[in-house]
Amino acid sequence: MAHPQQGSPARPEPREITELRRLREDQPDLAAAIDLQIELVQLQRRVQSRVSLPSIPLDASSLNARLTCAPILAFEHIPMDWGDLRFLVRATATAMRNHEALEDEDFRKAEQLARDATRLEQVVRAWYEGARRNGAEANEDDGVLGLENVLQQAMRPFLTRAADAIMARIDFAGWEQGRCPLCAGEPDLAVITPAAERLLICSRCQTRWRFHQLTCPFCLNPDRSRITSFASRDGRYRIYACDVCERYIKAYDARQASRPVLPVVDAVATLPLDAAAMQKGYR
Ligand SMILES: [Zn+2]
Ligand SMILES: [Zn+2]
């Protein structure tokens, strides 16, 4: 790991961490989840600044051509640094175990994985490409089972770097699917813009793309009488739950908000909404 230069000025704290600390004051009952999230953001920032750009042409016309046979980013094109990934797998698993967010058995699996370079590459590829298998559960023997959250967090700096670079160049116009055009991941959050459009946000790379306001992104059910939508008490968030596939997606309502959507913050802030949705039988 690179060590910070002595005497260099401290980097300003990222917005996510400031907002997570604020959330901790407002909602002390979420403290455990918030502390874990702060630790994960800090770990990812140690790697983020040196991730390189994805190895594909990044001009708009090449990217739009790739969009016709999406996902845009194949596993080979992710700007990986395997040493950094090994560090992140180990550190993420340790942080999650310390906050009781990972079983001991899965922690040991993660530790073994971080020591075995060949297997790590196989398992990460299976995780990345597995998203395309239309929501099918991970196979028992592909090594992903139990490590989905660890891998998602550990891969985040590499995938968000690629997503930021690509989002700066194209807006995914014409992409009408519920899955991420960049990595084929599923959305787990949306944002309602001041223009009342709904953008879905990928759970893996944080790519955002415009999507129909009510249609279910998971089963594409467009029947609004079979979508249950409700807001959080403070009006900041909404849930769209589908009565066909019984899945739901959360949204940050930016129309009257004082800050932009911050996926890592909003994921924690909406834990009570997850509980409410699950109590109603959605998953
Ligand atoms: Zn994605
Ligand atoms: Zn659905």
Image: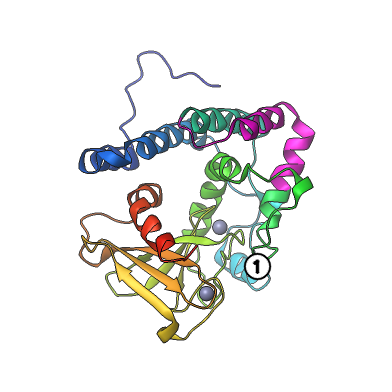
**Residue 29 appears in view:** yes
Within the image, what quadrant is residue 259 found in?
Answer: bottom left
- Give coordinates of residue 53: x percent, y percent: 58, 46
Determine which residue is flagged by label 1: 70
Measured along the vertical axis of the image, is residue 113 above or below residue 181? above
Who's the residue at 52% across and 81% down the image? 221
Q: Which amino acid does label 1 sit on?
A: Ala
- Give coordinates of residue 142: x percent, y percent: 76, 47
- Give coordinates of residue 219: x percent, y percent: 56, 75
Q: Give the quarter the ligand 1 occupies.
A: bottom right
Q: Give the range drawn in magenta.
A: 99-125
Helix, strand or loop at mark 1: loop
In the rendered structure, the answer to whether residue 35 lies left or right of residue 52 reads left
- Work out whether residue 222 or residue 19 is closer to the camera in this orientation and state it: 222
Who's the residue at 65% across and 48% down the image? 78
Within the image, what quadrant is residue 20 found in?
Answer: top left
Who's the residue at 60% across and 65% down the image? 63
Residue 105: within the magenta?
yes
- Give coordinates of residue 202: x percent, y percent: 51, 59
Measured along the vertical axis of the image, is residue 180 above or below residue 157? below
In the rendered structure, the answer to whether residue 265 lies left or right of residue 89 reads left
What's the image's color scheme? rainbow
Within the image, what quadrant is residue 192 found in?
Answer: bottom left
- Work out whether residue 11 or residue 187 is closer to the camera in this orientation and state it: 187
